[in-house]
Amino acid sequence: MLLGQRIARYIKEEAEKLIERYNLYHNVVHVEYVRNKKRLGDNCPNKDIKFPDYWQDNRKFNPFYVRKKYKAIAKSITKKIISREYKPNQPYVRQVPKSDGTTRDVTIFQIQDAAISKMYFDKLLTKNKHRFSSFSYAYRNDRNVHFAIQDIFVDFQNHNRMFVAEFDFSKFFPSISHKFLKLQFDENGFNISDEEKFIINSFLAINTNDNTGIPQGTSLSLFLANLSCWYIDKELEKLGVKFARYADDTLIWSSDYSKINAACIIINNFSKTSGIKINVKKSAGVSLITQTNLPSEIKKSNYIDFLEPVWN
């Protein structure tokens, strides 16, 4: 399939996905209105169908418009990619409250840019997923968090004692050094074409600080996140410890205490090299997981938290 045809297909699919999501919302509101109408009669409030506020910023956030114009949009983007002039438009950023009282920025890209990101993510993952560790479970089509939980549980239930290190990174996506990231393109055997490097660099360039950070809200950033952690995965594999990594949430375990200490050094070295700080508040450090009622010479626990409880 030619480049322009692939881009058109991805843009149309992205628009139709969002339309389906919006229609689902519309149907839920309508069903609730019909239910209230039966109960309240003339006192029933009017049906209020809302549109996302960012649809007003630019028509290319609106999936109904984009689906109508997807061929023309695809033709324009194809020319820009071939001439190396393509630049993603500035995304819409919405602040969403978190449980700790702070906020998280949710980034929403225009539909055609989200489609380009998804297209190149699919290409890069197809060519390179064999290079990623089997203990890396995030942002892949052959592994997921459920696999991680199952693998952890199966391994833990066969041991009475296990040393465990739990690590989480602070502001993982915004902190990754571009210099460190780009070194991974050529050093670790990944198959990334010049065109794909151009697309990656185009998305990296939208950050305010052009030296750090992966833009969130795109599929492409998910591939880059795993690419950034390739060093951790391979060093832990060479060390001979078991681990599960889901994005920046990393759980490492071994019956050998010295190997767990060596694993901590690997994590710290990665933090210094990549520019990503360890989240001290969320990183529990090293603990000893034992079966209930067994004695312990150091900090003891009979459970761990990896995304959700998996051992007790």
Image (cartoon, rainbow, N blue to C red):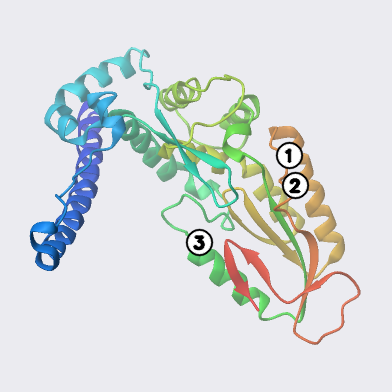
The residue that mark 1 highlights is 271
Q: x and y percent of residue 19 in the render? A: 19, 43
Judging from the image, what secondary structure is the residue with disc 1 in? helix
The image shows residue 193, relative to residue 76, as above or below, that is: below
Instruction: Report the residue that reaches farthest toward the front.
Output: 43
Relative depth, front residue between 141 and 102 = 102
Q: Residue at x 33, y 28 (%)?
A: 113
Q: Quadrant of residue 94?
A: top left
The reply to whether dot 2 and dot 1 touch (C-beta < 8 Å) is yes
The residue that mark 2 highlights is 267
Q: Residue at x 80, y 87 (%)?
A: 293
Q: Residue at x 85, y 69 (%)?
A: 299
Q: Residue at x 47, y 25 (%)?
A: 197
The residue that mark 3 highlights is 145
Q: Quadrant of residue 31?
A: bottom left
Judging from the image, what secondary structure is the residue with disc 2 in? helix
Separation of residues labelled 1 and 3 (CA atoms): 24 Å
**Is residue 243 toward the left or the right of residue 2 in the image?**
right
| CA neighbours of label 3 inside 10 A, class few (<14), some (14 to 19), many (20+) | some
Q: Quadrant of residue 275?
A: top right
| CA neighbours of label 1 inside 10 A, class few (<14), some (14 to 19), many (20+) | some
Separation of residues labelled 3 and 2 (CA atoms): 21 Å
Q: x and y percent of residue 21 in the render? A: 24, 49
